[in-house]
Amino acid sequence: MTVSDLNGPTLAERISAAQLDKLTLEVAQLHDDVRGSRVAKRITAVTPLLTVIIGVGGFLFGIYQFQSQQRDFQTRALAEQRRADETDKREQQLRIQAQIRTDAEALLRFFIEGDQTISSAAFRLEAMKSSLVFADAAKSSDSRSHYLNENVLTACIVKSVVDDSDLARWRDVAFVRLLLTSWPMYRDYLKTHQASTEYITDQYVDAAKTLASRAPQALAGIRDDAANNAYMYTGGKVGLNEHDVSYFDDLVFGLKEHLKLIANDNERNRQIDRFGSVINNKKLARGLLTFRP
């Protein structure tokens, strides 16, 4: 036995140290087991809650996904409905425009086609007014400005009166009277187109001159019976028939209404004096046609 052996730990000490190390490891293992058991217990305790949360989350996500799909479907359905509505409106607008065009073309041929009656023209005019109301209601979001509207139609009607009418014919005078009473835009248009207004007024005076050439004594002897809203033919009606008497009434009405649309006082007075001269009855002209603007 060496000296180092005598100075080192004895067998019993080594055994004790080994047992201590073993005990230390066992205690550490026990601590680990305890901690692991606590974590496991905690996990076990919260597992049902986590399951519920995940289940509820999945359910809510399913609801969200369903609602999202429903919104997408409704959005597509609304877009398709709007496109269908726009298509329907365009088709309806085209049908109405076709009807307006048909009525307008017939009215614009009134002065050159003698087979149209005033009553048929009045019917077409009212139908066209109704169609314009429907056209405005059926107007789609992409309606084009070239569609026939009241302004375009009025310009065409006035041009027809200026270019095609012959106010020496009773039916033409009667048609213009219809425009004055049933188509308000006719007056509005002439207020802003004075050259046309003055030209039409000239044609009325020329028509009165033609009538006076057939019955000068009758027209020169007319007196206004304002109390009875009638004319007195003091010189008789030589050269006039009942049709001519009605024609003269329409002639005076149309002339006066067009004079109201002339902005220039001098031009208006000139036409009044000219009318009085051609019928050789200035007193009647002043009495019938003078008014306060």
Image (cartoon, grey):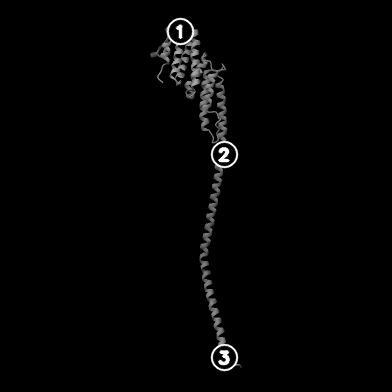
Q: Which mark is residue 218?
A: 1
Is residue 237 something that shows in the picture? no
Q: Which residue is at the far front?
A: 266
Instruction: Report whether residue 128 is seen.
Output: yes
Q: Is residue 291 left or right of residue 118?
A: left
Q: Nearer the viewer, residue 269 or 123?
A: 269
Q: Amino acid at mark 3?
A: Asn
- Of callouts 3 and 1, which one flags the residue occurring earlier in the amino acid sequence? 3
Question: How far apart are labels 2 and 1 at the CA level?
Answer: 68 Å
Q: Nearer the viewer, residue 104 or 32?
A: 104
Q: Which residue is mark 2?
A: 83
Type of the residue with mark 2 = Arg
Where residue 153 sits: x, y (%)?
53, 25
What residue is rendered at 51% in x and 31% in y? 136
What kind of element bears circle 3?
A: helix
Residue reaching furthest to the left:
227
Q: Name the residue located 52 percent from the left edge and 72 percent from the top edge.
A: 35
